[in-house]
Image (cartoon, rainbow, N blue to C red):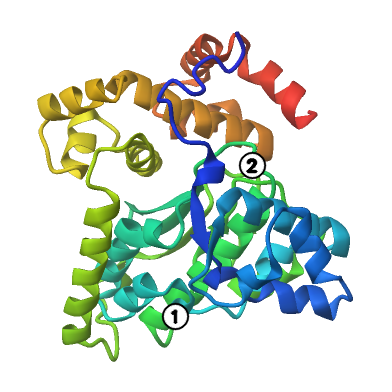
Amino acid sequence: MEDSTAGKLGRPPISDRVIRVGGAVGLLPLLRERGIEVEALVAQVGLPVTAFDHPDNVIPFAALGQFISLAADRTGLADIGLRACMRTRLGALGTVGYLVANSESVGSGLTCLQTYLHLHDEGAAPYLLLEDGVAILGYEVLESGLAGADQIAFGALAIGANILREICGAGFALREVTFAFHGPPDTSFFRAHFAAPVRFDAVRTALAFDAALLGRPIAGADSILRDVLMSQAREIDRVEGSELATDRIRRVMRTLLATGSFGQAQVAGAFGMNRRTLARRLQTCGTTFREVLDEARFDTARGLLKDSGASLADIALKLGYADATAFTRAFRRWSGTSPAAWRRKHAGF
């Protein structure tokens, strides 16, 4: 009965979720510099090389993960995701990036990023969290065990750091960078790019910085352009999300879970409805709030157990459990085995 909760929502496979290639356009030149035959490598994951010709092209999120995983193996660069994105700026995110750049303040810009990044990247969910005067901009890959998830996360935070530098302006500095993945043998590129302490095997993939910066106005922001871009983003979101689809539920739940605000009222509020309406809508999708929450917790737990060395106590805290014992009971109910046994089987330690 292992992994028994998987698929209860009847969710689409992650291969159906797509990502614009704008954030990954630096990958192919990097491979060519290393003498890699790019066309053959791209074809190996079932994509045409022309898929990377324009930043607005979209490819399956899983295919990008497979491609960047192969690229890491072929080049021997365990930090290739970071290297490929070190020069990627806001414009690579298309409409979403320009909306962030023209927001009134850093905080409102990052709120737009959290709300609309799915228009650029459907395979992950960003979130903004405040903790004791520290702002945390995080990135959650939605599918546990996805090939290349670590490299995608490395690249995402490289871009995130560039975004923060662009919108915060002079004097910006990160406090800490954490990854919910194992670190590569050589972390020198991480230290150089982030210019801050970098920690791996953490419970979240995130950038931490001074929360006071959230109120800083974004220099050069154009309010007229912002209104136009916001209208475009809302219209695209309305057309693509006209129904309370299971993948949208899943994304919102993962975002709220990461911020520790995952009660039924908070989830309902994220969809602009009350708890009763949410319950009815979930029922039409053939599920319940508890099943959605369990799936989000199970997916998050599996990712942390497989890809990081985070302790059971830390994972329990992230998932909203009082202690590791409560988490272990829940995980056994979901999978039929203990988290420690699952980790030994799937992560090799």
As drawn, is 211 to the left or to the right of 242? right
Identify the mark at residue 261; answer none if there is no mark.
Answer: none
User: Mark 1 is on which residue type?
Assistant: Gly
- Inspect this view and state whether residue 78 appears: no
Above or below, 9 against 78 in this view is above
Q: In percent of the image, x 24 and y 81: which residue is there?
A: 217
As drawn, is 258 to the left or to the right of 65? left
User: Mark 2 is on which residue type?
Assistant: Leu
Above or below, 217 against 136 in this view is below
Q: Which residue is mark 1?
A: 91
Q: Residues within 10 Å of mark 2 (few under 14, many from 20)?
A: some
Residue positioned most to the bottom: 220
- The percent position of residue 11, horizontal first and vertical second, equals 44, 31
Disc 2 is placed on an element classified as loop
Q: In percent of the image, x 54 and y 14: which residue is there?
A: 4
Identify the mark at residue 146; answer none if there is no mark.
Answer: 2
- The percent position of residue 345, horizontal first and vertical second, equals 76, 22
Disc 1 is placed on an element classified as helix
Q: Nearer the viewer, residue 232 or 139?
A: 232
Rendered-image quadrant of the N terminus: top right
Q: In percent of the image, x 27 and y 57: which residue is there?
A: 237
Q: Nearer the viewer, residue 202 or 26?
A: 26
Q: Nearer the viewer, residue 177 or 51?
A: 51
